Amino acid sequence: MNPLARIGRIFLGFLAHTGRLAVFIAQSFLAIIQPPYYLRLIGQQMIRIGYFSLPVVALTSFFTGGVLALQIYYGGNQFNSEAIVSSIVALGITRELGPVLGGLMVAGRVSAAIAAEIGTMRVTEQIDALTTLSTEPFKYLVAPRVIAAVISMPLLALVADIIGIMGGFVVGTQSLGFNPAIYMQLTIDFITPDDITSGLIKAAVFGFIIAIMGCYNGYHSAGGAQGVGRATTNAVVSASILILSANYLMTSLLFSS
Amino acid sequence: MTDMIKLTNVHKSFGSKHVLKGVDLSVEKGNSLVVIGGSGSGKSVMMKSILGLLTPETGEIEINGLPTVGLKGGKRDLVNRQFGMLFQNGALFDSLPVWQNVSFAAMQGSNMPADEALELAKESLALVGLGKNVLDLYPASLSGGMHKRVGLARAIATRPPIIFFDEPTTGLDPIMTDVINHLIRDCVSELGATTMTITHDMSSVRTIGDKAALLYQGKIIWTGNVDALEQSDDPFLVQFINGLADGPIEIAGA
């Protein structure tokens, strides 16, 4: 094939894919704002997305906080700056690492699960069955997952903030010899409400990305088990990339002033 | 007699593949039409077009006199509430127990309270010969035959005036095939519903159908009473109902 034609085909495919995703997001918004609201399903999804992600998010943030404390200490030691460990751990966790690493971990766990579940429903005609039973699949499948993820992710980020700071605290006080009271005081003094709020806003956006990419890839899966596997992989990869790009954009917007 | 389902010159393509090439078909009220045809002839696409799962490019589909092509949202829901559907592999919801699968339309569409929905599920399951012992089972623990029965119970749960059956006996042994065929016939006659069935299985055609239609390469090429099937000298029909490799029907992929 002509190389230009190949490039053109890839570009057109990308545009078509982007257009489909935009339409999917628009349909999802409509499904979210219009009744009926499946509150029981939203609750179930919050347990699946939020509650069952707690262990993985807690472990990730604890060790991240600890590693961050060590790195700042060893890096800062050369300039005699051990005192800034607590403040930078708090800042790094609340602004960036809590929501971003939490988001990436949840993307791996939840986005894949959503894509696999909805993808299986697609290839076994369960989504067609929903339509024939007068139930709108976007309202029944997509809206509860998106709402649950948008609510759950900030809560998970808050937990990640607390446990991440505790990770830094444990390493700082037990391994690096900092005074516990001074460490905590410095942390509290340095963090502002904006640091926490910005992280929670990011987490809500990441929750939206995680749920939408899982639902989108699952909903459009085709070709049996192989198609569901492909949808699952695509959901995790696309959600992770979008989380990182959205994080850059939001950091630019939230902290530009 | 009134046509409950009427297709006029329906065309549907997927990319360059023209699947339905002007389908004309009607089913009278209270009648049971069986559509036969080889794999890839367009039977499922035709049924999905009637159900609103696919939108034809041209042509008209009327349900009880109402044109339905392009209907969306609440208007489509109102049409779909007249339908019951038994999918080829059941399409039961994995995450719900049997009773919630059966009463799904009543609970979601009509906000039926759970206790009434449970009673409805029991009644519908009794119609297909299943007892209370299956109510709390999940689809993964059902056999193929039970899967079909639960699917049938779901299709008739709201007592719809029109019921569709997509390959209702695929994957079943001959005895279970006969059981399902008779269940369908008995349920439909009890409800007085209009039905459309697509199948390859000639035993289903003879047991379920009042009328039959042969779909070949996206067009209906024969229609008539089921009794007339055996007497027909149409070469396509003779080849299909006798399962002959030689004849005018082009075999897909051969």
Image: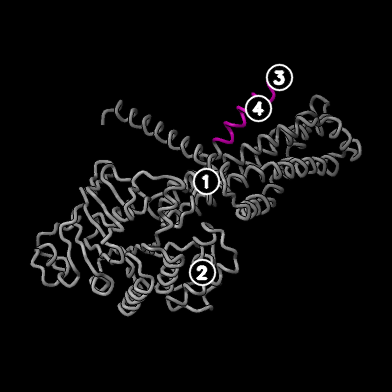
Q: Main secondary structure of the magenta part?
A: helix
Element under disc 3: loop
- Residue appearing at x 49%, y 50% in the figure: A137
Residue A251: which numbered mark, if any? 4
Rendered image quadrant of residue A254: top right
Mark 2 residue element: helix
Residue A176 falls left or right of residue B102:
right
Q: Residues within 10 Å of mark 1 (few under 14, many from 20)?
A: many
Q: Chain of mark 3?
A: A
Return the residue nearer the eye: A97 or B124: B124
Q: Which residue is mark 3?
A: A257
In the rendered view, would you say B235 is above or below A160?
below
**Chain on which label 4 sits:** A
The answer as to whether the residues below labels 2 and 3 share one chain is no
Where residue A2 appears, as percent x and y from the top left, is 26, 28
Q: Which residue is mark 2?
A: B98
Q: Which residues are magenta?
A: A242-257
Q: Magenta includes B30?
A: no
Q: Earlier in the sequence, mark 1 or mark 4?
A: 1
Residue A214, disc? 1
Q: Position of residue B82 (x, y in %)?
A: 40, 58
Identify whether B116 is placed above or below B11. Answer: below
Q: Nearer the viewer, mark 4 or mark 2?
A: 2
Nearer-the-camera pick, B144 or B92: B92
Tell me the chain of label 2: B
Residue type at tag 3 = Ser
Going by the numbered disc 1, the residue's amino acid type is Gly
The three-letter amino acid code for the residue at tag 4 is: Thr
